[in-house]
Amino acid sequence: MRFNLSFLLCLALFAAEPPKSGIETSGFDMTCKPCDDFWRFVNGTFLDKNPIPARYPNWGVMSIVSEANKERSRTILEAAMANKRAAAGSDTRKIGDLYGSCMDESAINARGIQPLKPELDRVAAVKSVKDLVGLFLALERYNPFQGPIGIVGAPDAKNSKVVVAYVGNGGLSLPDRDYYMKDDPRSVEIRKQFVQHVTKMFELMGESPTAAANAAESILKLETSFADASMTNVMRRDPYARYNKMDLAGLTKLAPTYDWKTLLTTLKISEKETLIVSEPKFISLFEKQLNEFPLENWKTWLRWRLLNNGASELSEPFADEDFHFNKTILTGAKEQLPRWQICSNIVDAQLGDALGKAFTEKHFPPAAKKRMLELVDNMRASLAEELQAADWLAPETRKNALAKLNAFKAKIGYPDRWRDYSAISISPKNYYENVQGTVLDRRLYQLAKIGKPVDRNDWGMTPPTVNAYYSPLQNEIAFPAGILQPPMFDMSADDAANYGAIGAVIGHEMGHGFDDQGSKFDAEGNLKNWWTPEDRTKFEQRANCVIDQFNTIDVGDGLHHTGKLVVGEALGDLGGLKLAYQAYHRTLRGKPAPPVLDGYTTDQRFFIAFAHVWGNQYREEAKRLRLNTDPHPLAKFRANGTVMNMPEFHKAFGCKQGDAMVRPAEKQCKLW
Ligand SMILES: [Zn+2]
């Protein structure tokens, strides 16, 4: 009885106090009308007051959450480093020692390029194409893309319960093949800067300026031939084009000079294993170049690859030059991250589960997981309703879409089972070797999966990450603990803001299951058509609407997105926001109308919370890099480009035809 009484008292107390709205009105730009530029209205003052810090290429709401997570990781890592009582071999000792060895800059600087010496000596010893191939094979065991090709394990796209070997290609030091192929002034300038950068790196290794400049030119030449034989980033979005099943004999026929048989033995992959080649054309080019490109130039390229790969773990001159090109030139960042942050990032990348376990124990309460599962369930129910009501789908397609939805697995916060790092040894010194050891351990862990059933425990992101993902091959959505924080997710805030922010993120990831790529995979994660031809045509018309929209939005300086590159993400945003809106309204059924809070109605707060997540600005260089390589539209257009298509938004803010935030009715896009 007493318990009941206190329970009622609690409810009464809550009822007396209006709920927190979850929106932050102080960041609004009241001089900008919501129907003119909604993103600016919601974020204008916030962005003006939060300029991009010198160390970053872009900055915004999610960056601030990410920065706070990094501070939390820092506290954990500094305590681990100082904890002299942590048992040898324990995860605490390992993360503390890796972090400590990274923080010891004087030891790193004193070693100069010496940590790379054993690998450079192996390159120097190469006397023939056979030796070169042998060295590629040996490096492949450590890192799949040191050479131009690499083998990685992943679920078979046509039999997704089993991990098979994918033969992929790389070999490019610039961010994308287009950087080598395009002739616009910016691309030409970047190639010039790249040659200067490689020259400088070779000079730092002790080469004469002339030899270094020649090396840089020959590297650009080889990589340009790789780029020419590689698919564009739009072509790569077609999973059928990248699925070319072969056996060992087929691969050997394609590139006889490369010793595929020994490669499989080195990687402990059975010769009978299914091999899926992403780009056979590239493998043929590789074969040609192995026999035609001068051996000495191949050796130069390989030295470059080793140096480029290890530069950020070497002494200051190398790390600084690496930063200058890869960050300042390509992204516009002006300063290095503080050392603690570089080191915290390294521990997150290399021993992610050990840091993640400590992170979630402190910063991810079980109640948050429970609330997220409720949100996901409600979104799922909402999508089921949408699909049931989608009269443009034939019954057969609808049945398959529902089966896909029902099979969605949601991962929240962190893995059920943490990785075992007992095979890794970390010393408080020797930073470079520590990183190599963790890279090798992860590589062997991944390779050992090939030929076995898929283990669904594994995650594609670490717990402190402020991000989320959908995996078409496993038909699953995942939300690391890092993103489940205000303003994306706030346990104490009113539902409108939570659905507008994290709800739209959940909906976005679900939407990927039905985007240009995800829609080609079925409920089991298999690449298999489950649409009737008529429905597929109608789906493609919907996708084309978004492609046209993003091809034509002027993002400033006359630049545009590539519609076919961003269509998957834009469809996820559009479908996700609609779904979150429906799911939110589902929670209101049979209840009294919710109150106006902070001067805004529930629907207004929903859209405000959505647009606030995309409160992010870019440096000019970063903006161009993103337009060229990233399937995600720029933040501003993830907000505005999405609400332009939503009548629910237009109604909430009273926007009319002719306003910038209203696409003409006949051009409004929808996923469902
Ligand atoms: Zn996405």
Image: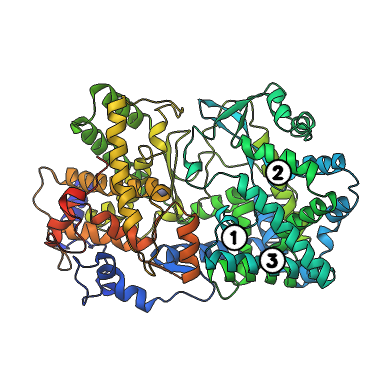
Instruction: Name which of mark 2 and mark 3 comes first in the sequence.
Output: 3
Could you tell me if the residues under marks 2 and 1 are in contact, i.e. CB atoms within 8 Å? Answer: no
| Residue 619, percent from left and from top | 46, 71
Instruction: Name which of mark 2 and mark 1 comes first in the sequence.
Output: 1
Q: What residue is rendered at 22% in x and 62% in y?
A: 21
| Residue 240, percent from left and from top | 49, 32
In the rendered image of this protein, does residue 43 appear above or below residue 550? below
> Foreground residue, 107 or 9?
107
Task: Give the position of the N terminus as an image quadrant.
Answer: top left
Residue 213 is drawn in which quadrant? bottom right
Q: Secondary structure at mark 1?
A: helix
- Give me the disc on residue 441: 2
State the colouring used for the structure image. rainbow
Calculate the distance from the C-alpha at mark 3 to the C-alpha at mark 1: 29 Å
In the rendered image of this protein, does residue 590 appear above or below residue 161? below
Q: Quick check: can you spot residue 171?
A: no
Q: Amino acid at mark 3?
A: Val
Q: What residue is rendered at 60% in x and 37% in y?
A: 279
Residue 348 is drawn in which quadrant? bottom right
Calculate the distance from the C-alpha at mark 2 to the C-alpha at mark 3: 34 Å
- Give me the disc on residue 58: none
Q: Amino acid at mark 2?
A: Asp
Task: Give the position of the C terminus as an image quadrant.
Answer: top left
Instruction: Name which of mark 3 and mark 1 comes first in the sequence.
Output: 3
Q: Secondary structure at mark 3?
A: helix
Label 1 sits on residue: 345
Label 3 sits on residue: 195
**How many residues crowd mark 1 within 10 Å: few (<14), some (14–19), many (20+)?**
some
